[in-house]
Structure formats: structure tokens, C-alpha cells
Amino acid sequence: MIFDVVTIFPDFFTSILGQGMLKRALAGGQVEIRLHDLRAFTDDAHRTVDDRPFGGGPGMVFKPEPVFRAVDALRAESGPPSFPVILLSPQGRLLRQPVAEQLARQARVVLICGRYEGVDQRVAEHLVTEELSIGDYVLSGGEIAAAVVMEAVTRLLPGVLGNEESHIEESFAPIAAVSDRRLDFAQERPEGLDAKDAAIPAAGLSRSGQHGLLDFPQYTRPAEFRGYKVPEVLLSGNHEEIRRWRRRAALEKTWRRRPDLLATLPLSGEDRRTLEEIKSTALEPVAW
Ligand code: SAH
């Protein structure tokens, strides 16, 4: 997969590309990250990318011409016939795990990093395919947002994570919920509904934009640290009990911290029963 990043600060990315998962994915060829200096697409001696806002007000705004030229140049290159051209913006669609999964299916993605007061509106309206936000707060530039997108997407690409750090069973991962729901249907399918109708395609869950639960709590050695003990069941070696404990812990954490995620999640019969139990005995949800 190729990321083309359009930025006035290409050097910004040096450290994040030089270590950890992204470094490995670059070395392994699963991802290619190409940094494009927006100033290379200007045509004046000062390499001007910004100008004062029409209508007045503080700050500067990215001019449309260099951004249009940069994207035109990238689109003119040979490669996949069409690909997302994304403007990082606090006004965009929120980056959530299903969005990262969608992007991970693309062969190429262009990321445009704004600065100052933002980017001339004509870029959003007539050039890019979408605007993407990494959260409801304002950054000074799109570079960190672009890095977040690349990090979240690259780790989903086949071969990037080893088994030992698989993303199948972590927060927001939809897979476990799907397979559980399949079991549920097999056991509790209403009369007259045949298996074909009941089956949910694994990919369908993410395509429909749904999330999984938050991850269950993780522990490692030592089993006791400063008097704080690891839950007994995790030391038991009983895989079925460990599975049930983890599922319950994930359900409880999600219910307490992110009830919004639970609202859209298809839960198995076992999950629903566990959740009722949790609700009747556990602490109240956390109001962040
Ligand atoms: N005036 C704009 C904010 C501009 S911030 C507004 O109020 O909407 C400058 C640049 O930082 C933006 O063009 C965008 O590329 C980037 N940026 C800021 N916050 C962001 C966020 N939450 N997600 C993605 N990009 C963001």
C-alpha cells in the first residue's frame, strides 16, 4: 500500500518512520510512504503556500493552487485508477477503527496536511474525496493526524503484525463479536429463518461501521506486584474459564466506559446474559 503525504513539513515524519511498526512495515515492503513538499508545487520565488483570508480575520489560509497541482501530479502518475484523496481536517468524518479497516483495503491513499487557519474551501469541495478528522479537538497541523492515520492503517495490513501482537483481539476489533453472533444464531435461530439468511459475513460488520468491545485487561509477570495481584483465573490454565472471564471483563469495561459502543454491537445470548448480570451487580457506568 502506498501513502502519499502532502505537507509543508516533510521532515516532521522522520522519527515516526524510523522506528517500531512503521519502520518494519516500510522495510518489509508492506507499505510505502512518499513525502511531498507542498512548496515544490508553488510557482513564485518565495514558494508561497498561504495567503490572508478573504473577508478578514486572523491568520493565514493554504492557497488552492499548490494543493490542486500536487494532487493533479499524483493522479497523473500511473498506479491504481482511483484512490482516496483525504484532507485531514477537524471538520471531517471521524477516524474510527472501521474507517481504518476501509482504508487498509486501498492500494493507495493521499493525505493532505493543512496548517494555519486551514485550507481554502475549494480543496474540500472540488479536489479531495473526503475530509478526515482524528478527533474533536484542533491541532496546529495535519501532520500528526496523517501519522495517526498511517499508523492505524498500516498495522492492519497483512504481514505487518506478527501473531504475538495480533490485532484480531484488541479494542474495537469486530471479529470476535461476529463469530459469537454466528454461534448465537445457530443456537437460537427463530423458526422459518434458514442459515443462509442468518449468516453474517465477517467483513459486513466492519463495512456497516460497527465496532467491537474494548479490550479485556492484560497482565504479565509478576503475579503479585506491591501487593497487587493478577486475577486468579488467569493463572489457572483453564482456557474456557479464562475466555469467559475476559469476555465478561471486556463487556463490563465497555459498558462502564463506552456504552455508546455497546449500543450498536450485535451481542450473543451469552453476552446479553453476562451483561444483565454485570448491570445488576457492577458499579455504575463512568461519565467521562
Ligand atoms: N480553522 C480550522 C482548523 C485549522 S487547524 C477549523 O477550525 O476547523 C490547521 C490544520 O490542522 C487543518 O487544516 C488540519 O489539516 C489539521 N487538523 C487540525 N485538527 C485536526 C483534527 N482534529 N483532525 C485532523 N486534522 C486536523
Image (spheres, helix red, strand yellow):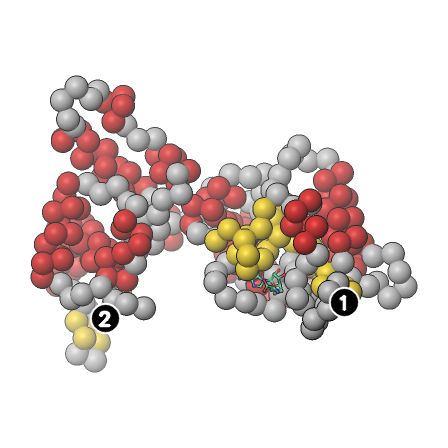
Say whether residue 163 is visible.
Answer: yes
Q: Quadrant of the N terminus?
A: top right
- Secondary element type, mark 2: loop
Decide if ligand 1 comes within 8 Å of the CB at mark 2: no
- Decide: is 120 above or below 52: above
Residue type (three-letter) at the residue carrying disc 2: Pro
- Provide residue 177's location: percent of width, then percent of height: 27, 42
State the image quarter where residue 45 is shown. bottom right
Q: Measuring 22% from the left and 39% from the top, which residue is drawn there?
A: 180
- Secondary element type, mark 1: loop
Residue at numbered disc 1: 52
- Decide: is 246 above or below 129: below
Decide if ligand 1 comes within 8 Å of the CB at mark 1: no
- Decide: is 182 above or below 125: above
Which mark, residue 21? none
- Provide residue 195's location: percent of width, then percent of height: 23, 22
Residue type (three-letter) at the residue carrying disc 1: Arg
Q: Measuring 19% from the left and 31% from the top, which residue is drawn there?
A: 185
Query: Between residues 151 and 92, which one lies in front from this camera angle?
Result: 92
- Provide residue 267's location: percent of width, then percent of height: 22, 43
- Provide residue 3's location: percent of width, then percent of height: 62, 48
Image quarter for ligand 1: bottom right
State the image quarter where residue 77 is shown. top right
Which mark, residue 222? 2
